[in-house]
């Protein structure tokens, strides 16, 4: 290798990601039409393939913070999920050191259960031991701030406001140590006070993690945290380089 | 752009070669079977917590809450008592037909609910699967665990019914335990199988009610098992009577009833039950593990 100091942590090699989406009510749905479709062996109109990421290659090194930018639906979140190993790659490959973890706000929790039970369940699902969960539980609830306005942690999550449940989800996800950390729009959660707290927490996590990927529509948080930027557009890489340069190109594109 | 940048820094090494040299592994690689089993064992606390969370959230909206766990099997038995005990008046050739019937119904429904919840275990939890990283078998396992707990409660109700209908408590009642363990393992394997199959072929969910009804009539639940001997003979009879649910039901009847006429001698039933348990639990687990990395697509 030409450069010995740079240790790669995530490598994407011509990665393609294709979703299959079963959709109800698409096209004609009468029994006769379905039967005709089967008899003629034509393609099922209810299953649509979404080619979200089309041949993406990059190498991420230890100590880098990489911002992923692009317009809505350009495949940023899909790519992150594939790096985390949560979505399979259809062609090509993605290699990673250790187990990358995705820090998102959409971790599915159970709405019928009280907040503290959800904290336990979420931590166990991330692979913590029961002793760790007991040790961290109060800290997580404290951090989320859901108890600021009364004892909400023992009420079912369906009674929470959307901001409160998003804050609790973020707090659960941010409670774990990571090798490769993938952050998906998580910084935009909650009010100004919580946002400041969560940005501080992400900086802490970055200091511990080897490599950080950040998906965000907030230009400011990308500029603040990332020195390198990858611009995805319609599933392909439009630019990859220092944040300033890529951002300039992206802004010129977005203004058009 | 990317590829030129890579070529510069790494002197033309292919990306695959670069990954191999630095010991990076492809995300989404299938772990070996022993590794997978170990991972699953490490997640046992999650499986338990998920199962009790599901139980609580399913009953969370009802007034009676956990009382339903006991009430459901009692009402279930009451329905069959009204129809077969009062309206139709039982079968003359089968002693204590109500207890005979209830055992069949309860044991059958144990497997039936596992098949139903197992089929939904992957397709109904795609949000969780796409958000977090954990061995996917945790989900069908926790679904089966819920049903195992429900069945243990139902078993106590069943024993109460058997006592009320005039059966004595004997040492043979201890047989219930190994049968419970075997059927639970069988169900876990079946649940795992259905979870993968249901996530691959979603149409199967529409067919399950019919398959289960067919299985119900093939398991001598609603009528005495001797009916099969009147109708069939030779290898046909052996095939019908090798049905795993019929075997578990017959063993339960053997345990709880004094003079039930069994399909086969207890020894044959034990062997059949054991073979089914090993076959389905291991087969289901291996089948589910082979698909581990595909869950979450589509």
Image (spheres, coloured by chain):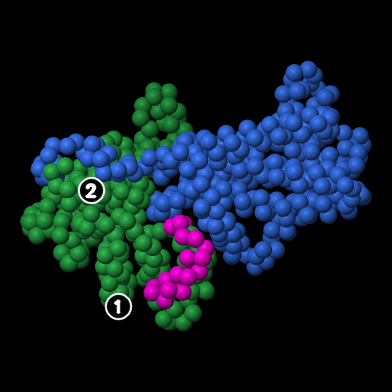
Residue at image x 9%, y 60%?
Answer: A244
How far apart in space, not on screen, are marks 2 and 1 (Cα)?
36 Å
Whether residue B41 is visible, yes or no, is yes
Between B46 and A135, the one lying in front of the other is A135
| Residue stretch in magenta | A125-144
Q: Which residue is mark 2?
A: A8
Q: Which residue is mark 1?
A: A193
Residue at image x 20%, y 42%?
Answer: A57
Q: Secondary structure at mark 2?
A: strand
Between B248 and A208, the one lying in front of the other is A208
The chain to which mark 2 is attached is A
Can you tell which quarter of the image residue B253 is in?
top right
Q: Residues within 10 Å of mark 1 (few under 14, many from 20)?
A: few
Foreground label between 2 and 1: 2
User: In the shown orientation, is residue A61 left or right of residue A127?
Assistant: left
Q: Residues within 10 Å of mark 2 (few under 14, many from 20)?
A: many
| The residue positioned farthest toward the top in the image shown | B234
Residue B74 at x, y percent in the picture: 76, 55
The chain that appears blue in the image is: B
The chain to which mark 1 is attached is A
Residue at image x 41%, y 69%?
Answer: A168
């Amino acid at each position: 290798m030409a450069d010995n100091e740079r240790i790669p942590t995530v490598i994407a090699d011509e990665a393609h990601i294709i979703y299959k989406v079963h959709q109800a009510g698409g096209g004609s749905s009468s029994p006769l039409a379905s039967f005709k479709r089967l008899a003629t062996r034509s393609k099922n109109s209810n299953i649509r393939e979404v080619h979200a990421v089309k041949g993406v290659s990059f190498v991420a090194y230890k100590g880098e913070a990489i911002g992923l930018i692009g317009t809505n639906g350009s495949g940023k979140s899909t790519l992150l999920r594939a790096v985390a190993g949560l979505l399979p790659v259809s062609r090509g490959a993605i290699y990673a050191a250790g187990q990358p973890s995705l820090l998102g706000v959409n971790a599915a929790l159970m709405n019928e259960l009280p907040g503290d039970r959800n904290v336990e369940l979420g931590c166990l699902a991330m692979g913590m031991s029961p002793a760790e969960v007991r040790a961290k539980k109060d800290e997580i609830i404290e951090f989320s701030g859901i108890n600021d306005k009364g004892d909400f942690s023992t009420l079912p999550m369906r009674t929470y406001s959307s901001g409160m449940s998003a804050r609790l989800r973020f707090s659960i996800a941010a409670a774990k140590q990571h090798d490769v950390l993938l952050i998906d729009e998580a910084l935009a959660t909650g009010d100004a006070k919580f946002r400041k707290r969560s940005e501080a927490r992400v900086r802490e996590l970055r200091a511990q993690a080897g490599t950080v990927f950040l998906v965000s529509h907030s230009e400011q948080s990308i500029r603040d945290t990332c020195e390198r930027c990858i611009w995805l557009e319609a599933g392909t890489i439009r630019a990859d380089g220092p944040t300033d340069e890529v951002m300039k190109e992206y802004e010129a594109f977005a203004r058009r | 752009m990317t590829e030129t940048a890579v070529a510069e820094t790494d002197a033309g090494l292919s990306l695959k070669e670069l990954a191999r040299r630095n010991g990076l592994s492809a995300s989404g690689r299938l772990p070996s079977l022993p590794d997978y089993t170990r991972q699953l064992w490490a997640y046992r606390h999650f499986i338990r917590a998920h199962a009790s969370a599901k139980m609580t959230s399913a009953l969370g909206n009802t007034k009676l809450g956990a009382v339903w766990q006991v009430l459901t099997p009692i009402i279930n038995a009451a329905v069959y008592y009204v129809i077969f005990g009062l309206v139709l008046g039982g079968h003359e050739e089968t002693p204590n037909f109500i207890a005979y019937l209830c055992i069949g119904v309860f044991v059958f429904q144990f497997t039936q609910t596992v098949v139903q919840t197992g089929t939904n275990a992957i397709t109904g939890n795609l949000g969780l699967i796409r958000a977090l990283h954990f061995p996917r078998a945790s989900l069908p396992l926790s679904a089966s665990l819920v049903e195992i707990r429900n069945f243990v409660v139902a078993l106590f109700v069943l024993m109460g019914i058997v006592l009320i209908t005039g059966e004595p408590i004997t040492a043979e009642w201890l047989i219930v335990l190994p049968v419970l363990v075997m059927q639970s393992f069988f169900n876990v394997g079946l649940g795992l199988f259905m979870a993968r199959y249901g996530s691959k072929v979603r149409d199967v969910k529409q067919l399950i009610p019919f398959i289960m009804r067919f299985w119900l009539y093939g398991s001598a639940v609603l009528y005495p098992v001797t009916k099969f001997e009147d109708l069939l003979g030779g290898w046909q009879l052996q095939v019908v009577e090798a049905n795993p649910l019929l075997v578990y039901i017959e063993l339960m009847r053997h345990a709880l009833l004094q003079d039930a006429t069994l399909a086969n001698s207890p020894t044959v039933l034990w062997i059949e039950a054991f073979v089914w348990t090993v076959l389905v639990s291991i087969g289901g687990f291996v089948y589910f593990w082979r698909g581990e990395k595909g869950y979450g697509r589509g």
